[in-house]
Amino acid sequence: MDRPEALRRVGVLVLGANAALAAAKGLVWLETGSLAVGSEAANSLVDTAYSAVVVAGIYLTTRPPDPDHPHGHERIEPFVSLAIAVGVLAVGVVLLWQSATTVLAGEVSVARGPLALAVLGVGAVVKYLLYRYCLAAGRVHESPALVATALDNRIDVLTAGAAFLGVAGAQAGAPLLDPLAAGVVSLAILYTGIEIARDNVNYLIGRAPSEELRETIVERALDHPDVEGVHDVIAHYVGPEVDVSLHVEIEGDRTVEEAHGIETDVMRSIEAIPRVDDTFVHVDPKGLGEWKAEPESEHVAETVPSTRSPNGSRSNVSDSEGDGSRG
């Protein structure tokens, strides 16, 4: 299954599940009057709304490139995730206010019978299954929107559990546990919203990827038998994908055609990394004074073991010989 179809299928499934949970919890809330169940119904209602936003966003992000968007539309995904974060934070604030005012007023409606506990228990199970499913799909397809959805579902498991304990405690003779459970739910919702917003703001402001990914990029460049060294490696997020630029050092006796072939091979090798989108490779032939001295070279390159190709060329920065511009 290709990425666009997989993302759309996941989005529609999550939308349907959240709509069903919102309807079930809403009906039970109307029947029992439990604030904990009502907070969970509101939570599921917002989940349904943002699931619709995710489905619309996934449709936009999986459209093919066009003349106005030559790199495609994937960079919309962080904006979709931020819309999710705004909705999650809004619900958290409202639920926290409701639980606080109820506790202060001291007027609590206690849900009687097993109905409230049953809908909360079923909701927790469904949310756990959605969490695992969305997280796996988000990692496989490198989708920030699905990862954000998975994180929200993970918190929903905990909030449903807190609501369950609150309703059970209220039925056992401690009615204030119901609104207190709703307060716990609201705090968890607020935490989720902050977490989603923080992660996706980093995508939008061009934060550098992990050191592990940077090391992989350098290793891919140094794997080429004609690359003597690597420096000035710059990697940063552009939306959910990573753009890379770097300088590779080669011997000065290479022809233009050979240098172009080396540049192309390195570019394709780095772009084969799942999270990498565009790679820009600058070739520095020996003798032009652009090779870096050892202290100025990429430190991650020093972690790559020295290898020697059959033609005698070296692939480790520390084993390369310079022309006076390298130490």
Image (tube, rainbow, N blue to C red):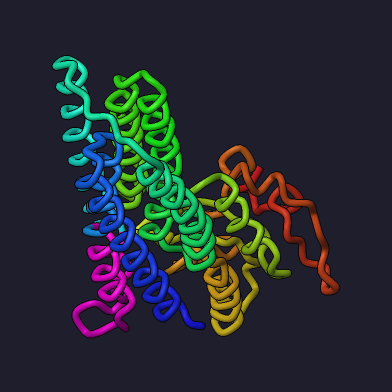
Residue 82 higher or lower than 245, as above or below? above
Task: Determine if residue 82 is in view.
Answer: no
Residue range highlighted in magenta: 50-77
Q: Where residue 97 sits in the image (x, y, percent)?
A: 16, 27
For this view, does 106 lie left or right of residue 160? left
Q: Residue at x 18, y 40 (%)?
A: 90
Residue 244, placed above or below residue 254: above
Q: Quadrant of the C terminus?
A: top right
Q: Nearer the viewer, residue 254 or 7?
A: 7
* Furthest residue in direction right, as rendered: 310
Residue at the image position 73 percent from the left and 54 percent from the top: 316
In percent of width and height, residue 202 lies at 34, 46
Query: Which is more toward the observer, 310 or 208?
Result: 208
Q: Position of residue 163 (x, y in %)?
A: 37, 35
* Residue 290 belongs to the span the image colors magenta: no
Queried whether the magenta region covers residue 53, the answer comes back as yes
